[in-house]
Amino acid sequence: MIIGVARHCFSIDGDGVITFVVFHGCQLRCCYCLNLQSLVDGDRFKEYTSGSLYDEVRTDELYFFTVNGGMSLGRGKLCFLRNFIHEFRLL
């Protein structure tokens, strides 16, 4: 599940315009968590497949080439999503 897709972000992960995909859910429950929204009930967040996420963000490709930007995947515990991320990267 994904909390949201933030477009046209600057200075998050490197230079250029970044599209930031914010995942929901984390099993760690760290006391210093910066994103408590990722810990709440996930019923209100959208569920994506790797293909539907790719369709959602591929429109940003022009920005990536023009201003040396890219994508960043964050929040949640991404190591639990390695198959999803691998499939996404293959697209």
Image: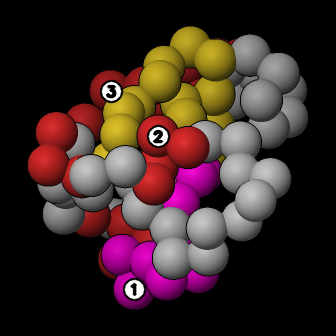
Residue at (53% x, 60% y) in the render: 76
Residue bounds of the magenta highlight: 74-84
Q: Main secondary structure of the magenta part?
A: helix
Q: Which mark is residue 83?
A: 1
Front in this rendered view, residue 14 or 34: 34
Q: Residue 87: x and y, percent? A: 35, 77
Query: Taking 67 as reference, is 73 above or below it?
Result: below
Alpha carbon separation for disc pair 3 and 2: 26 Å
Front in this rendered view, residue 13 or 24: 24
Front in this rendered view, residue 76 or 17: 76
The amino acid type found where label 2 is placed reads: Gln
**Which of the two discs, 1 and 2, sits closer to the camera?**
2
Alpha carbon separation for disc pair 1 and 3: 23 Å
Query: Taking 71 as reference, is 23 above or below it?
Result: below
The amino acid type found where label 1 is placed reads: Asn
Q: Is tag 3's residue or tag 2's residue first in the polypeptide sequence?
A: 2
Residue lying farthest to the front in this orientation: 31
Q: Which mark is residue 59?
A: 3
Query: Taking 87 as reference, is 89 above or below it?
Result: above
Q: How many marks?
A: 3
Q: Which mark is residue 37?
A: 2
Which picture quadrant has residue 83?
Answer: bottom left
Secondary element under disc 3, as helix, strand or loop, is: helix
